[in-house]
Image (spheres, grey):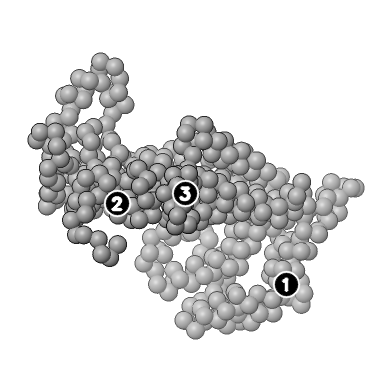
Amino acid sequence: MAGAAPNKKQPNGTSPTAANIPFASTTAAANDGNSKSIRKNPPLRGLFALVLLLLAIRQAHVFLTRAYTIRLEAIKEYGLIIHEFDPYFNFRAATYLFDHVYGTLNGGHGYGWVRGWKMFCEWFDYKVWYPLGRPVGTTIYPGMQVTAVWLTKCWLPIWFGLNEKFGGFFSVIGFFFDDSVSGVKKKMVTKSARKVSAYFQASNDPIMSAVASLMHNMGMKWKEMSLNDVCCLMPAWFGALTTLVTGFLALECSAHFCHDHGNKFGTVFDDLPFIGYYIRKITTPIRKKLTYYSGLDITTNTNKSSSSLQTASLFSMLATMFFMSIIPAHLMRSVGGGFDNESVAVFAMTLVFYCWTRALRGGTSGAKAEDDCVHVVEGEDNVGAYIREKQDQGFKLSSRTRAAVFYGCVTGIAYFYMVMSWGGYVFVINLVGAHAGTMVLLGRHSSKLHAAYSSFYFVGTALATRVPVVGLS
């Protein structure tokens, strides 16, 4: 609040002016059991924190690169070809959608997304399941095909243009187009962005027409990959993205976001009976020194840090990314050339879980929490307590409840992508519902949980019914 007193204490008793440096622990010096002063940060603590963060980013980049390149072994040996039977059918369906949206039909311009999508949903393929045929539009999960067409004609040309024009950041994560393995860049087709803009205009796509026109005005070229190459590389791309999202999920679950305490980085033996006592007794002095001089949360004492990037959380994220990049169960479903539903669906599944845990993240601490949740201990966002406190002033949603609604909607959108991609979407909504129910049984119900699940279920179910194969059944 603007008129708040400058010496106002935080709920944990610390001064609001105490420095909060990532990975650092501001430890209260207790001489007689009472917290009297905040230990000043050593000069090198911020430097150690910055070095640790840069090393974590670098190592995450290494894991993502290896997660991608290890999935290109089949392409490296056999070239950019589709493997197995199901991927061939999926590629044929993607080709049909591509031809009707942006392809050679309708005078060489396609029909655009609206009419092309409608024709795809009504497509009856007489060449499969002979002599019966198959109504493809109502028996396929089209998320992978839509993604392939969108990447080919919309996102990738923009990415290539930005990478060529600006480089820098775009070149750092350009390992997704490692030419030494896949030979993608040699097969790209360069077009005039101005002609492409006219092409999109004739294909009833004014948005992409405006984007291509903007790229022409900025002097950027329009480079395209073939649909076959995109479909071959998509499993490897999404395998790397799944590795990244799973790492974020581990970070979200292990870090203490927006709380006044950091996580503890010890050993698995610390809590063992008898042995753990002596391990803590021997190693605690060493951990205290490392905590003080390096800023790492490696002590088992009660050290406090409002940083969301504690050391143990970063290590958990990196370890998760390492295992996810090489785990056989995921590797076998995301090999280059294996254009199958699971290659995209696993990414969508982990994205739903990450968004769901993000929706349940704790809210802000300190004065902001006091403004949002009056007289609610430790920021517990309880509906009943809040209504009782504000019954004479009207109901007001806290910032955490509003954030839960927003991220619940984002989770619903991610769930919609999961429904479009694979029939295993039932596992996802059941697991999220089981988690929410378990929270209630454990006495952890709050307006945050209620708002997150309600918004997720409403948005996710409403969008899922728009998928033809699901409908209202």
Foreground tag (2 vs 3): 3
Q: Nearer the viewer, residue 297 or 341?
A: 297
Residue type marked 2: Gly
Residue type marked 3: Ile
Question: From where the camera sits, is residue 61 visible?
Answer: no
Residue occupying the point 69% across, 75% down:
203
Question: From where the camera sits, is residue 153 visible?
Answer: yes
- Look at mark 3 in the image and give the residue it sits on: 387
- Look at mark 1 in the image and give the residue it sits on: 110
Secondary structure, mark 2, is loop
For marks 2 and 3, give the CA distance: 21 Å
Specify few, some or many for label 2: CA neighbours under 10 Å numbering under 14, 14-19, or 20 or more: many
Residue occupying the point 69% across, 79% down:
202
Secondary structure, mark 3, is helix
First in residue order: circle 2 vs circle 1: 1
Secondary structure, mark 1, is loop
Q: Nearer the viewer, residue 169 or 308?
A: 308
Q: Is residue 141 left or right of residue 430?
A: right
Q: Is residue 376 left or right of residue 23?
A: right
Quadrant of the drawing holding the N terminus: bottom left
Foreground tag (3 vs 1): 3
Foreground tag (2 vs 1): 2
Res. 201 image quadrant: bottom right
- Look at mark 2 in the image and give the residue it sits on: 366
First in residue order: circle 3 vs circle 1: 1
